[in-house]
Image (tube, rainbow, N blue to C red):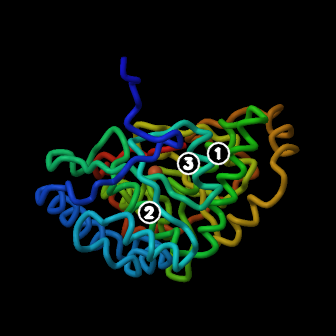
Amino acid sequence: MAEVRPDFNSDFSIEQNWQDYSEEEHAIWRLLFERHRRLLVGRACPEFLDGLGALGVAAEGIPDFRRLGQVLDAATGWRIAAVPGLVPDDVFFAYLAHRRFPSTCFIRRRDQLDYLQEPDIFHDICGHVPLLMNPVFADYMQAYGEGGLKALGLGHLQHLARLYWYTVEFGLIATQEGLRIYGSGILSSAGESVYCLEDRRPNRIRFDLRRVMRTRYCIDDFQQTYFVIDDFQQLFDATRPDFAPIYDEIASQPEIEPDALISSDRKFDQASPSRLNGGKKMGRRLTAAQV
Ligand SMILES: [Fe+2]
């Protein structure tokens, strides 16, 4: 009897089979890409927009990971690994620790432009890869992967996952021009890209590692709290210490609800009244993917 073999390798990698994408799939990519590019001017941080522009090949249609990987590798030494979807935590962290970003290959349908249960290739590539062109953020992602492998061994994955959630997926950054977005979960969503910057309701708090690790998050609605970093160096520096004593310290402290403020919070107050939208929800967001 023939052995039944899974259709992916032991590291969950698969072939992208770029030649098999249909013209409709490329057209959906181009539609999403153009909307994305227009929406994010003045909202995404400059490092993200620079990275998106420098990737170049992404504007033409669904990119071939081999070509995209060459551009990325030349910039920061990262590569793209095609995977079938969400992968186990240890596999995900190992990819990051080796400077390889795992990306799904499928693209959403035309009737799913604004909402999808799982991350697709557009979220993974257009949401995450532009910042991997930035050397400091690229190092942060590798450090996060290494930290993830340690956290698994220490039983503190939940605390570390919150760091990913509130930075890589839903992070905001202070710039000379005001607050900007760098989190991919936000950048994949037209609605949340506006809401996180302009709505009165969410908390915008200065980044604090322990505070982030203690804070629960919502997975099925816009965030109620965003953490604001000063720059990517701050983020990278925050991941340098050994997290083991920090995990021990926060393990005895209460968890913080997604919408709560605590006395040590330093709020970031930048929303100018003229840009507020009166609290109107702008639409649904794309799910934030791997944590
Ligand atoms: Fe993601």
Report the residue marked by disc 1: 261
Q: Residue at x 75, y 61 (%)?
A: 238
User: Which element is circle 1 on?
Assistant: loop
Report the residue marked by disc 3: 165
Residue 150 appears in the rendering: yes
Q: Position of residue 201 (x, y in %)?
A: 46, 50
Report the residue marked by disc 2: 197
Q: Residue at x 30, y 46 (%)?
A: 284
Between marks 1 and 3, how big is the CA–CA gap? 18 Å
Given the image, on which type of amino acid does mark 2 rest?
Leu
Q: Position of residue 77 (x, y in %)?
A: 57, 72
Between marks 3 and 2, how big is the CA–CA gap? 17 Å
Given the image, on which type of amino acid does mark 3 rest?
Trp
Q: Residue at x 58, y 39 (%)?
A: 89
Say above or below: 287 vs 47. above
The N terminus sits in image quarter = top left
Q: Position of residue 218 (x, y in %)?
A: 49, 38
